[in-house]
Structure formats: C-alpha cells, structure tokens
Image: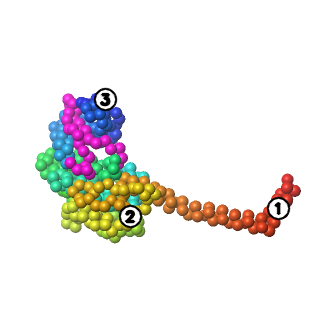
Amino acid sequence: MQQQIGRYQILETVAVGSQGSVYQAYDSDTGQVVALKVLLSNHTQNPTYVERFTREGTMIASLDHPNIVKIFEVGNDGDTHFMSFEYLPESLDNIIKASSPMIVNSVVQFGQQICAGLELAHNNEIIHRDIKPQNILIGSEGQAKIVDFGIAHADRMSGITEAGAILGTPHYMSPEQALGKPADHRSDIYALGCLLYQMITGVLPFDDEDPMKVIRMQVDEQPVKLKKLRNDIPKKLISIIEKAMGKELAIRYQKISDLSSDLNKLEQTLPSPQFTNPNITTQEQPYNQTQQSQQGKFRPSESWLDEWSQAWERTHKNNIAKITAILSILGGLGYILVQFGYLSIITDAIKKLF
C-alpha cells in the first residue's frame, strides 16, 4: 500500500472490506488525523464501482448531522479513489462486547440517536442497507454516528444498484433483502430492530456459523422471545423491537420517525440509572429535538462503563457475603476462646507438643 495518497499520509490499516480499505491517515492540510477509505484497486477499472463509490461520498457529505460521520473530502489521486472522514476509533460493536447485555437506558438512547441519523438519510431518499454495530461509531461525547454507506441506495441511484443482488450482513438483513427483493427504508428499520435486540439481550436474534442458514432464519423463523433471555426488559421496549423486526412490511414500522417517537416516549418513563460517578451527564438531545434539562441524565458512552462495575458486583456479591460470614464466625470463636481461657490452654498444649 502506498504511504501517501494526495495530501494524506497513511499511518495504519483500520479495516479491509470487499469494496475498500479504511486507513488512519494524517491530513497535511488541516493537521488532523482522519479516516481514509480507499476503493480497492481491482474495482478502480470498473466504472460502476467508481461511480457508486464517488456517489456514496458525495451523498453522505451532503448530510450534515451529529449522528452521521462527517465526510471531509471525496477525490482521487490518479487511479486511487478515496474519501476522508472523521476518525473515531470506538464502535458500538466494541461497547456491546464489553458490556453485554447493556442497561435499558443505554439501549434506548443509542436507538434514538441511530434513528435520528437514519431519519435525515431517509428524508433524502437514502437507504443504508447495512446497519450493524460495526457501522455505528462513537463520538467523543458518546454520540452514535452512522458510517459506511458503501451499499447505500438512493432512488436517484437505482440504475447503479445491481438487480436481485443480496446486499447486507446476514445477522441484520431484512427478509426482503434476504430474498433478493428491492429494499426500502423499512429494511433499515428491521436491521435496527435486530441491533436493539442484540444490545438488550447480549445475543443475536439469529445466529449460525453458516451465513446462508442465518439468511434463511431471517425469512422463516422467529427469534427467541426477549422475556426468555432477560426478565427486566420494559414491555414497551419489547413491543418496539418486535414491531421493528416484523417479517411482513405491513406490520413493521413504516417510518423511522415512528420508531424514534416510541423510543422517546419510553425514555420518559425510565428511572435514571445509578452511577458510581455522580457527575456523569448527557449530551444535548440530537438533531432537531428540543433541548431538555440534563439533570440526572448520562452519556451513553459512559453508561456502559458503569455496567462493568454493575456486572462485577453481580458476579462477586455472593462471594463477598460468604467471606464476610466466615470472618464473623472466626471472630466470634476467637472472642469465646479468650473470654473463657481456652486460648491459653490451647497455646500451652501446642508448646508442649513442639
């Protein structure tokens, strides 16, 4: 890999995908570290891939939203086509792995923020089609930011998308995508439903080592009921996730704004979580929402850190209780031995033996 692309100095490889590679790079013009997505060289001779890659960048660059990763530049250096965007090393995938299952408040707030970003995209006739935890990056203030619209589809791009192609990630793929049918904005809603399911339970709704089996599950099977996996999930959240994951388009949420509205209503009924750090506060409400009082709120990025301490307490609470009980009993026995003179008798006996 070349070490310099345009004004960008390559620092290290972040990820390699089927369409392109992502690098951490230094922008010599601005002096900041950015992420640089580069179209794979074997695609650069294909006008369709080049046009799709360029349109992805220009589409997303037009979406100015705190819950969508900001695109800085879309361009090329000779035959090398690239786009630069915010470098955010943390992802929702890492958070899920570190604090699974997540507390209800965190799930709801991340869900709201992803909805906010998708709503702007959908209003601009852009469908992501690959919503998954790896494509949700986390900003410095803890906000979710959608990235990688690499297989995004816009109505004005319909001629560039291959008909009948199965695009997406099996674990979050809507039934219509799995069947190779045209996908609309409701496919993003289904994927977000799968993501909410995973965040709240710690497991995928459908999973198998064989990706084709997972695809068939998305079409033919129902996931394990949420209540069987976790008994403290609010009924309203269960209803939201089940509706988002509706197999039939007609019973699924028809608009991402409807899903967002239900999550907002649910949040108003949730008690504030308890934290070891009382100074944790939330960021401002995302895009186009009225600013509300921040007292008692929290940043999603820090809420999962608190979950670690909660998980530790749950794991070790019984052991601590047992140790405390044993120490209390030993202390009581020692007191009895001293009070009734048995301790000196035992000490003398030991001295005689040795």
> Which type of secondary structure does the marked residue at label 2 adopt?
loop
Give the farthest residue toward the bottom.
235
**What's under tag 2, amino acid-wise?**
Ser
- Could you classify mark 3 by the number of other residues whose Cα lies within 10 Å: few (under 14), some (14-19), or many (20 or more)? few
Count of marks, rendered view: 3
Location of residue 327 in the rendering, given as x and y in whole percent from the top left corner: 66, 62
Q: Which mark, residue 128?
A: none
Whether the magenta-drawn stretch holds residue 75 is answered as yes
Distance of mark 3 from mark 2, alpha carbons?
48 Å
Distance of mark 1 from mark 2, alpha carbons?
57 Å
Distance of mark 1 from mark 3, alpha carbons?
79 Å
* Residue 8, visible in the rendered structure: no
Asked if the residues shown at circle 1 and circle 3 are in contact, with their CB atoms under 8 angstroms apart, the answer is: no
Span colored in magenta? 64-91
For marks 3 and 2, the one nearer the N-term is 3
For marks 1 and 2, the one nearer the N-term is 2
Q: Which mark, residue 272?
A: 2
**What's under tag 3, amino acid-wise?**
Gln
Location of residue 33 in the rendering, given as x and y in whole percent from the top left corner: 31, 37
Q: Which mark, residue 3?
A: 3
Viewer-side label of 3, 2:
2
> Which type of secondary structure does the marked residue at label 1 adopt?
helix
Give the farthest residue toward the right.
352
Viewer-proximal residue among 98 and 283: 283
Rendered image quadrant of residue 279: bottom left
**What's under tag 1, amino acid-wise?**
Ser
Instruction: Give the residue at mark 1.
Output: 344
Q: Quadrant of the N terminus?
A: top left
- Could you classify mark 2 by the number of other residues whose Cα lies within 10 Å: few (under 14), some (14-19), or many (20 or more)? few
- Could you classify mark 1 by the number of other residues whose Cα lies within 10 Å: few (under 14), some (14-19), or many (20 or more)? few
Location of residue 314 in the rendering, given as x and y in whole percent from the top left corner: 50, 61
